[in-house]
Image (spheres, rainbow, N blue to C red):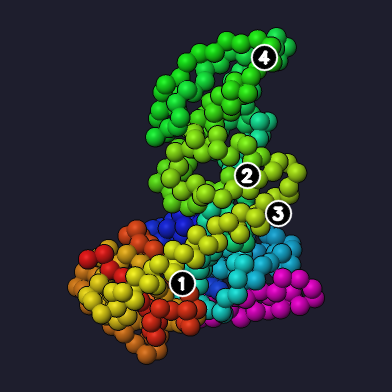
């Protein structure tokens, strides 16, 4: 099982494929009713087999195509007892991946030349990714989280303690290190700019300690540069209160949020830190979505917005869509040929059709736009799709 991130979704989109099988099913988390998970999956698996045959594969070819799915499930004795609220499975030539989904999904089997991703997109918008940086003198950890999960991530060269950065020799009670004397850094490459050398013995002054921490935090900020470069996810700081302004002074990541989690992180469980961090970043995600909806309303009578599939789908392929709202649990079947710029819309799914809402969402993501997959009653217009165009 993989962790679902925007980068993971993009890798699903961009992976070379032939037929792509996407299977979604709601799952029961605990109790004797978990036995229904396997029964429900077998029904969906048979549906996928039949759809592959409808698309021209023989029965043996269809079974071989889906073999990685059955092998992966059979390899885990308690697979069906270790579920979340939903399950998403994706299989194509020589490739299989599945995700335990912490939200309700509808039963759905889709086979086209792209993975069907719209049901999991809400996990990447209002429930999107954030980072949590846990700081203390003797421990540094970076976590990646969303509404439902949090996990530690490995950042190469991230310092693990202040002693590691300052090379402090406690046996001699001597500190010899470089300290930052600037008031802050404007980019990740100037962490040593404006530094001097301090040699001291005995108990350090308050200014010396502050400079120790500042140099420590410059090193952390520098190590985070490659990992966070180009990302837009909010970063939450967790540390004792007096360290907050010192780290902010050294920080150059533009999405460090104003609020932080104060107190000694070692006294707080990861679950509690996750909950506190989510309370901080949730308004960040909701504000972005509300602004996108307001922008749509302001542009609703102009050529910079649309609720029409025949306008929005091509615009998404050609990189014109800046922000897109699509309704989850709704499908609009058809086909779009970007080479001929021709679109077909069907009332019912036909062989070779794709969900045009899903296609528009995927292409918007690929081209650097933002997608909000929301419940139908949360759409900014009475339609299954609503777009704000770049031009």
| Residue 249 left/right relative to 299 | right
Q: Residues within 10 Å of mark 4 (few under 14, many from 20)?
A: few
| Residue found 52% across the figure and 20% down from its top | 179
| Residue found 73% across the figure and 47% down from its top | 268
Q: Residues within 10 Å of mark 1 (few under 14, many from 20)?
A: many
**Residue at the disc numbered 1:** 373
N-terminal of the pair, mark 2 or mark 3, is 2
* Horizontal and vertical percent position of residue 333: 38, 82
Q: Are marks 1 and 3 in contact (CB under 8 Å)?
A: no
User: Which contiguous range is marked in magenta?
Assistant: 25-50
The image's mark for residue 238 is: 2
Q: Are marks 2 and 4 in contact (CB under 8 Å)?
A: no
**Residue at the disc numbered 4:** 169
Q: CA distance from mark 4 to mark 1?
A: 54 Å
* Horizontal and vertical percent position of residue 40: 65, 79
**Residue at the disc numbered 3:** 272
> Furthest residue to the left?
340
Along the line of sight, which residue is nearer the eye, 172 or 246?
246
N-terminal of the pair, mark 3 or mark 4, is 4
* Horizontal and vertical percent position of residue 127: 54, 64
């Amino acid at each position: 099982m993989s962790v679902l991130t925007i980068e993971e979704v993009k890798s699903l989109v961009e992976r070379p494929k032939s037929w792509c099988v996407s299977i979604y099913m709601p799952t029961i988390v605990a109790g004797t009713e978990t036995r229904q998970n396997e029964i429900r999956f077998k029904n969906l698996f048979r549906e996928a087999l039949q759809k592959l045959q409808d698309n021209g594969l023989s029965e043996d070819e269809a079974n071989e195509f889906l073999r990685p799915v059955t092998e992966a499930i059979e390899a885990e004795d308690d697979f069906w007892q270790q579920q979340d609220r939903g399950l998403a499975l994706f299989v194509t030539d020589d490739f299989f991946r599945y995700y335990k989904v912490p939200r309700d999904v509808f039963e759905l089997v889709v086979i086209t030349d792209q993975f069907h991703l719209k049901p999991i997109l809400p996990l990447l918008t209002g429930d999107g990714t954030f980072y949590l940086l846990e700081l203390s003198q003797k421990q540094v950890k970076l976590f990646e989280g969303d509404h439902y999960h949090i996990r530690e991530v490995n950042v190469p060269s991230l310092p693990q303690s202040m002693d590691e950065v300052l090379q402090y020799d406690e046996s001699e009670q001597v500190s010899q290190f470089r300290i930052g004397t600037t008031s802050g850094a404007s980019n990740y490459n100037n962490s040593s700019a404006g530094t001097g050398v301090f040699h001291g013995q005995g108990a350090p002054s308050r200014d010396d300690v502050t400079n120790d921490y500042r140099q420590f935090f410059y090193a952390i900020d520098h190590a985070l540069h490659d990992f966070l470069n180009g990302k837009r996810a909010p970063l939450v700081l967790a540390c004792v209160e007096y360290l907050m302004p010192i780290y902010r002074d050294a920080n150059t990541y533009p999405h460090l949020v104003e609020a932080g989690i104060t107190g000694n992180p070692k006294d707080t469980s990861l679950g509690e830190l996750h909950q506190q961090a989510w309370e901080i970043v949730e308004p960040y995600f909701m504000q972005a979505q509300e602004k996108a909806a307001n922008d749509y309303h302001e542009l609703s009578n102009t050529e910079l917005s649309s609720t029409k599939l025949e306008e929005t789908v091509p615009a998404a392929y050609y990189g014109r869509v800046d922000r897109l709202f699509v309704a989850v649990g709704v499908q609009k079947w058809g086909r779009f040929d970007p080479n001929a710029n021709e679109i077909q819309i069907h009332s019912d799914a036909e062989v070779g059709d794709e969900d045009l809402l899903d296609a528009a969402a995927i292409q918007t993501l690929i081209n650097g736009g933002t997608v909000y997959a929301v419940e139908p009653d949360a759409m900014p217009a009475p339609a299954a799709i609503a777009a704000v165009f770049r031009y």
